[in-house]
Amino acid sequence: MNIEEKLTVKLGKPIASASDEEIYIALNSIVKEQIAARELTGGNKKLYYISAEFLTGRQLGRNLVNLQIFHEVLALLRKYGKDLKDVEEYEPEPSLGNGGLGRLAACFMDSIASLNLNGDGVGLRYHFGLFKQEFRNHCQYEVPDRWISENSFVTKTDVSFPVQFGNRTVHSRMYDLDVIGFEKGHSKLHLFDLDTIDESIVKDGINFDKKDIDKNLTLFLYPDDSDKDGQLLRIYQQYFMVSNAAQLIIKEQKDLGHDLHHLADHVAVQINDTHPSLIIPELIRLLIQEGFSFREAADIVTGVCGYTNHTILAEALEKWPMSYLNEVVPHLMPIIGGLDYAAVCAHHDNHELNIIDREGKVHMARMDMHYSHSINGVAALHTSILQHQELRPFYEIKPERFNNKTNGITFRRWLMHSNPELTKYIIDMIGTNWMNNPSELERIMYFHNDENTLNDIAEIKHTKKQQAAHYLKEKEGVIVDPDSIFSIQVKRMHEYKRQQMNALYIIFEYLRIKSGIYPAAPVTIIFGGKAAPAYTMAKNVIHLILCLQELINNDPEVSKYLRVVMLQNYNVSKAEVIIPAADISEQISLASKEASGTGNMKFMLNGAVTLGTNDGANVEIRDLVGWENIYTFGRSSDDVINLYNTNGYHAIDYYNRSESIRRCVDFITSPELLRIGNEEMLKSLQDNLKHKDWFMTLLDLEDYCNVKETVYFDYLNRPKWTRMMLVNIARSGFFSSDRTIREYNRDIWHL
């Protein structure tokens, strides 16, 4: 029975007369049946990839691609006047992550399955995710993101484990999300929850009683930790996640009849950032219960665990007061104390190596580094900075443990699903081998001087821009010109990512237009991203952008040349529309602060040209495409690190020296913006930029503005620009998450 026959049977009516929702439910059922028929991947050794985030995105389209029926379904629905994108809208998007960390974990799960490796993910089933972002009065407001539904691909199991906290024991419930690979492979994402969670306790946005653990434990990802109760809740969450993971590991290994003395021969655990760090003492505790000595258990766990560092930001390297851990997990504290003594106190006198510091705080990353056999960064520059700057004391004593694994993305979602037009064209050019071997995209370079090919690629980009413009009008209520340049910065809102610098550029351009100096071509600047609920300065940046959006888009003189869009509740589904439409990929973080980035790879794959600092994986993009196919600006990472070390940057000096900078910063509290916005929020942001500016916005602002004008002029040379697009697509194969996972397996997991 072919897809059309199966769908018609499921619907019980002709496809043409079925609603989009009915088609979604029917396709969902067909996909689940095909998944159930695919055998789970097995093997002698198994990976447990533990992460606080798995930003999976909607599953229907991904599964159709990996079952290799996506284009068939796409054509079938078009035949009957239906659009698969409209059908997919009926799937609630799993709210299990926030930004790059979670999206990376989802890409890795896709690649683990597609490479037919024996590996499962372990995380939490958050009921409301981070939050759903709403804009009111030009400000971000947070409300629960209610995504769990009866038609979800996430299914309940009968697996449950007891989890001991200081003053209570709770009993978990495991939910599973099937992860099928492309052509082959079948893994599971195990998401743990409590049956006692009470969604009704959330009042007034996302506020709730943080002390009632039985009812609140898995309500939200990253609950507000600006007070003690919030910090304790994060520890409860993290321990709940890893205790379930550790018990699952021991159970599965026993069921297989494996000797726990040889656990490292059968199990690999990857600690994705510091959130799962307590897996180390928890696994040791369970092994001690099985009769192992402390030293033997610690040695076994070290052979099992690998640690991925995703940041050099000090605030993101978690450390918890001993008193908090004593309250939540007192049974782990003797083990953590023993680990500190065994690894450091008995051998070293450098207090920077201590797991428990002089202030009585437990450093998660330090524990990970002492008791993991592998420590990896996620881009070449990032790993170098870790080795020679941020983690230097550890690199000096354990250099053999350090390695680099440059991040990657799954081309199944970020090209084959989100850009079927470009996918089909690439197949027509070079066949289908690139789908399993993305380095084959290099063959596109044979066409880089072919006029017809360049015209076709430009036309596909224009089609994606038209689709995005239609989407923005329908979903965001914003009208944009698809013939304008689309310059896009979509990522988590954070000062180091410097959305505020892009906003200052918008002011720069606005003032130029008002003075009669017009850009080389009309420009649409698009933002998307959420600010953490307690991150006041990031919320102030959103406020400024939304104020600029109203000011500029309603100004008939300016809006002919410049438009601004801030996407509401940016998520994977919106990324799938916006990223293929981008002309310019804005990757403007302060050099040395972005570990890698993966949005830069998604944009590159879809033919956008990078405008960025020499930071994170931008450096590797530059090396792959050549200086002539990327635009870079700003001070180097070495310069920035030196400025931090010498206290050599003072924002007010740049403000005072440059009239251009001063005019942009002053405009934040101009009468034009104060008529729209909140004076306190705008003034706070302005004062920060003048007197603090920890991430050195003003350091690179003038260079950024100048290079951006060059980009716009170059865009008008359509053959040159389209050739740059082609080169970026052709050279993107390196950034496949399949390549990254092969490297993890080759060097760390040995599955």
Image (cartoon, rainbow, N blue to C red):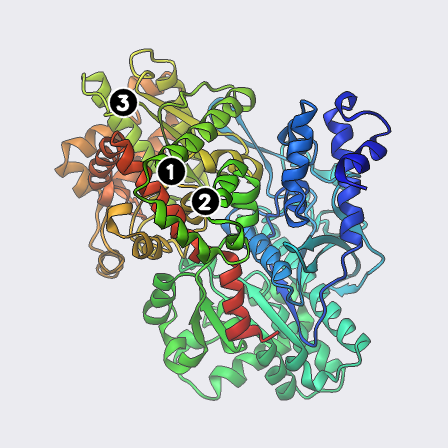
Q: Amino acid at mark 2?
A: Met
C-alpha span from label 1 to label 3 = 36 Å
Is 474 situated above or below 496? above
> Which residue occupies the extreme left position in the image?
657
Tally of numbered discs? 3
Cα–Cα gap, marks 1 and 2: 9 Å
Residue positioned 52% across, 34% down in the render:
577
Query: Secondary structure under badge 3?
Result: helix
Answer yes or no: is residue 9 visible: yes
The residue mark sitting in front, 3 or 2, is 2
The answer to whether the residue labelled 3 contacts the one labelled 2, judged by CB atoms less than 8 Å apart, is: no
Dot label at residue 453: 1
| Residue drawn at x 73%, y 40% as measured from the top left | 148
In the drawing, what numbered circle is on residue 510? 3
In the rendered image, residue 89, in percent from the top left (x then y), is placed at 66, 31
- The kind of residue on which mark 3 rests is Tyr
| Mark 1 or mark 2, earlier in chain | 2
Rendered position, 291 above or below 223: below
* Quadrant of the image containing the N terminus: top right
Task: Judge by depth and name the residue closer to the eye, 695 or 40.
Answer: 40
In this figure, which residue is indicated by the disc labeled 2? 429
Confirm or deny contact between disc 1 and disc 2 (CB under 8 A): yes
Going from N to C along the chain, the mark reached first, 3 or 2, is 2
